[in-house]
């Protein structure tokens, strides 16, 4: 009896489908983690730009600019245009900062004498707990401005320290870091 080998058997097809399923089950979560890391890098880059804009503004005009949270609503998993919510003279435009393109995060700056703090927050993974990143520049007397978005301190996961200044980091270990 001559066998005609023009196709696959049902067993061969089931094995291929199983292998593809296993590959997808391992690759998709990794891809989603990569996307979340990429989106959260926006906050770090923009906070560094806000820091530079504030320092430049302070060098020229002798003080820092406090801003309202902009855009007005919490960021999420979809990009959106930046809308500066502050009044003239008290907004990001005054300090000369505006992000490029669409954004995921909401930004705010608070000031106190010769100190300022900036923060960014968004719910990138949709778990109703925002991811918050911040930066704190203490004044000459060591006092700091309150960090926006009810953040108590900038947390360093490696050293387990929660009162970092002068560097950009997540707002506490328990304050809504996205699950990576």
Image: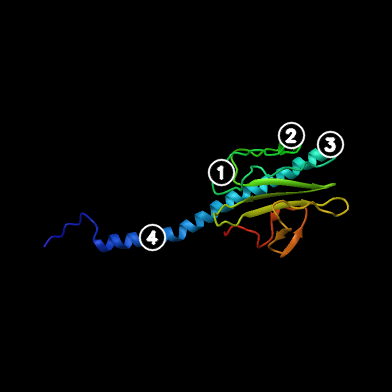
* Distance of label 3 from label 1 (alpha carbons): 33 Å
Depth check, front residue: 12 or 161: 161
Where does label 3 land, which residue? 61
- For marks 1 and 4, the one nearer the N-term is 4
Which is more foreground, mark 1 or mark 4? 1
* Distance of label 3 from label 2 (alpha carbons): 16 Å
Q: Residues within 10 Å of mark 3 (few under 14, many from 20)?
A: few
The residue drawn where x is 71% and y is 60% is: 155
Secondary element under disc 1, as helix, strand or loop, is loop
Quarter holding the N terminus is bottom left
The residue drawn where x is 65% and y is 59% is: 175
Q: Position of residue 180 (x, y in %)?
A: 57, 59
Where does label 4 land, which residue? 21
Q: Position of residue 120 (x, y in %)?
A: 67, 49
Where does label 1 land, which residue? 79
Q: Residues within 10 Å of mark 2 (few under 14, many from 20)?
A: few
Where does label 2 land, which residue? 88
Residues at discs 2 and 4 in contact (Cβ within 8 Å): no
- For marks 1 and 2, the one nearer the N-term is 1
């Amino acid at each position: 009896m001559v066998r005609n080998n023009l196709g696959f058997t049902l067993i061969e097809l089931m094995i291929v489908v199983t292998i593809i399923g296993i590959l997808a089950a391992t690759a998709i979560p990794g891809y989603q983690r990569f996307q979340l890391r990429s989106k959260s890098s926006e906050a770090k880059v923009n906070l560094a730009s806000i820091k530079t804009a504030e320092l430049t503004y302070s060098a020229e005009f002798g003080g820092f600019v406090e801003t309202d949270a902009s855009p007005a609503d919490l960021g999420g998993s979809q990009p959106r245009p930046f809308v500066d919510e502050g009044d003239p003279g008290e907004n990001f435009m005054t300090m000369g900062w505006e992000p490029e393109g669409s954004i995921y995060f909401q930004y705010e700056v608070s000031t106190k004498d010769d100190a300022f703090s900036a923060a960014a927050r968004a719910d990138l993974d949709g778990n109703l707990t925002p991811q918050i990143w911040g930066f704190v520049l203490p004044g000459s007397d060591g006092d700091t401005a309150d960090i926006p978005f009810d953040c108590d301190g900038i947390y360093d996961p490696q050293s387990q320290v929660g009162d970092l200044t002068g560097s950009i980091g997540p707002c506490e270990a328990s304050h809504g870091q996205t699950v990576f």
